[in-house]
Structure formats: C-alpha cells, structure tokens
Image: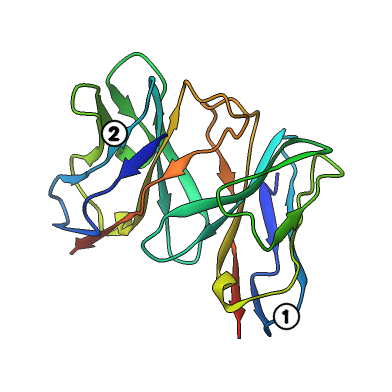
Amino acid sequence: AQSVAQPEDQVNVAEGNPLTVKCTYSVSGNPYLFWYVQYPNRGLQFLLKYITGDNLVKGSYGFEAEFNKSQTSFHLKKPSALVSDSALYFCAVRDQLMDTGRRALTFGSGTRLQVQP
Amino acid sequence: NAGVTQTPKFQVLKTGQSMTLQCAQDMNHEYMSWYRQDPGMGLRLIHYSVGAGITDQGEVPNGYNVSRSTTEDFPLRLLSAAPSQTSVYFCASSYSGQGNNEQFFGPGTRLTVL
C-alpha cells in the first residue's frame, strides 16, 4: 500500500524568510511524488513532481522540493516566502509498482501555510 | 482551453434526494477522476475512468455512480443523498493513466446534504 504523511497541520513563516513544508511517504517500489497547492475556494494546482533523476526538483512560483530516498521524504521549500504563498499544500504519492489499474494518487491531509507580512 | 469545468459550484440537497455533478474537460485527456475533500483527510478517490466506456471504483465509491460516454464528460451521480456526503467534490483529468502525469483539477462543487 502507498501512503503519505504531512506532519504539520499549519506552518507559519514571516514574509522574506525561507519556508519548508514537510512530506514523508511509504511505497513498496519507487515513488512518483507530487506537490499541489490549493488557494481558497479553488481547485488544486500542480506545483512540481519527482519522477526520476535529480533529487532537487524545481517547480512553479519559485518552489522546489528535495527527494530523499533514505528518509522517504519530499519536503517542499522556497528560499523567500511571499504573503501570496499563503494556501493549503498537498503532497501526493503513487507507487510505481502498483498495477491495479487504479492509477490514483494518495494525498496527504494537507498543510496550511500562513505567511505573515 | 477552459480546462476542467464543474457545475454547479454550490448545491444544497435534502436527505434522499438525487443529483448529478457535472464535469467536463477540453484537453482530450484519457483519464478522469472524482475526489471528495473533507477537512483533515486530504482528497479521497471516489471513481475514475481510463477512457470512454471504462470506469472503476476508487477508495470511497459507495453511494455514487459514474459513467463515461464521451472523452470529455464524466458526471458523478448521487443516488440517494446522505448527510455523510456533505463535502467538496473535485473532478480531475490527466493525459493518460500513467502515474507520472500530473492531474488537472476543476474548481470544485461544494455540496451540503441536510
């Protein structure tokens, strides 16, 4: 079975400071990993993904994520937070070994990022 | 491209009523899916489709039906609404069922069942 955990319900950071939103995962094989962002009253928007290759993945809006296989983590980072980054962030995983035909992602419970001016 | 569209945006139902949530995409995506979002639980898969005429159950399918008669449309039917179905529903699509494809989400339908 595949699973993903986001241990923090909320992360608070001051504008201009670096931010990290944590994600750990569990799969049987190798993972496909994704980050999505949800702004109020909107659907989820894709930020970035890890498929294979470089452990540091760069995505939209200046975000990046670091894949760490030994720690089974895929933390989302940004060097300098903006107030407009305040939103709900979801990590998602799919086990490359899964062949159920379901082709579904398993989502974490979400982390609310609050950036204070 | 409009992307993924959903109607209605909001809906209030009484227990036992039925309704259909509409979803359409204009990106010629093979794969479409329905999720429900509940506080503190992330998104849970209800049903999905890998192409016209093909549907299958997800994680929480009870009380919901789907059909996929065309590539573009993937409606979700609530057969007899229950208060436990109060949630925000998202439709999503992706180019194919391959696991490395990102999904595109609609704006959601907020459903309240009284």
Residue type at mark 1 is Gly
Of residues B54 and A60, the one nearer the viewer is: B54
- The percent coordinates of residue B6 (x first, y second) are 69, 59
**Front-most of B26 and B88?**
B88
User: Which dot marks residue B16?
Assistant: 1
Question: Helix or strand or loop: what does disc 1 sit on?
Answer: loop
With respect to residue A86, does A54 lie above or below?
above
Total numbered circles: 2
Question: Percent x, y for residue B74?
Answer: 76, 50
The residues tagged by marks 2 and 1 sit, at their Cα atoms, a distance apart of: 46 Å
Residue receiving disc 2: A64
Q: Name the chain under label 1.
A: B
Q: Is residue B43 visible?
A: yes
Which corner quadrant holds the C terminus of chain B?
bottom right
Residue occupying image coordinates x 60% and y 46%: B58
Secondary structure found at label 2: strand
